[in-house]
Amino acid sequence: MTGRVDAHHHLWDLAVRHHAWIDPDRMSRIHRDFSTVDLAAAVAGTGVDRTVVVQSVAVAAETAELLAVAAADDLVAGVVGWVDLTDPAVADRLAELVAGPGGDRLVGIRHLVQAEPDPRWLCRPDVRRGLAAVEAAGLAYDLLVFPHQLPAATEAARALSDLRLVLDHLGKPPIAAGALEPWAGLLRRLAAEPGVTVKLSGMVTEASSSGWTVEDLRPFADSALNAFGPDRTMFGSDWPVCLLAADGYADVLAAADALTAGLSAGERAAVFGGTADRVYGLDAGS
């Protein structure tokens, strides 16, 4: 495949579904609909020709809607959807999604673990059963966690060694505070589990909505790249959420280019496509 892969973005229609987390006052820039038409305009001229759309609400119907969008537009090569991992029938729910319209584009599942008050939510027996069902379905699982939840993620990775786990947004380190520890140490422990990869994504919104530089991001990006290596790192824009802290899509991509400029051509090819292709099976889904 040629071109680049954006392994993390969102789409939503606020007329179809209310997104309670989008505050219309604090997040006015993204308090509107975002469709594949907007996505195509955002990536035009960037070299990005395939993307992975990721769930944004814990509503089962959203996944079916995103699969339908992906089936109708080859720009969206994969969907990371949502199911209730604690549902005893979660394996059936996954099978229904795969068998339904656009089901060949389902490449992963995600839950907003960052919103769970229990820091060990990923260690609960019912959650582990759900994760095992995701593994059995041949899907990846995206980890959306805060640093204090990384130990539980590491335990889950160790317990389910055949499950492909993808850490979103570097585990949301405190970039604005410039504090590498204890996040970096926790990240290295997670990276020691070979089935885990990381997304070079979400950094600008963790930095500052009032301004950031590439050098503000660099220590955190370097920590992730050193821990996981380029072959286990993938670029994600987190568009349109990134618009809360960046003027446009191109600014986020330019930052990722600058942060990976020291890598070889082969290593950059992994970060900007190869890793996502392998972990999500995008070639097979497309």
Image (cartoon, rainbow, N blue to C red):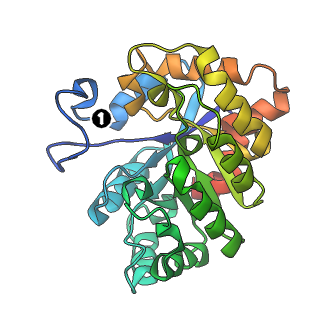
Can residue 76 be seen here? The reply is yes
Q: In the picture shown, does residue 172 fall above or below 209?
A: below
Mark 1 secondary-structure assignment: loop
* Crowd rating for badge 1 (residues with CA inside 10 Å; few <14, some 14–19, many 20+): some
Q: Which residue is mark 1?
A: 34
Residue 116 vs residue 132, the one in the foreground? 116
Above/below status of 256 relative to 146:
above
Q: Position of residue 192 (x, y in %)?
A: 78, 56
Q: Position of residue 23 (x, y in %)?
A: 21, 35
Q: Quadrant of residue 33?
A: top left
Task: Note whether residue 160 is visible.
Answer: no
Image point (34%, 31%), residue name: 37
Q: Which residue is located at x 64 percent, y 33 percent?
A: 180
Comparing 75 with 240, the one in front is 240
The residue type indicated by label 1 comes to Phe
* Image point (79%, 37%), residue name: 226
* Quarter of image, res 160: bottom right
> Quadrant of the image for the N terminus?
top right
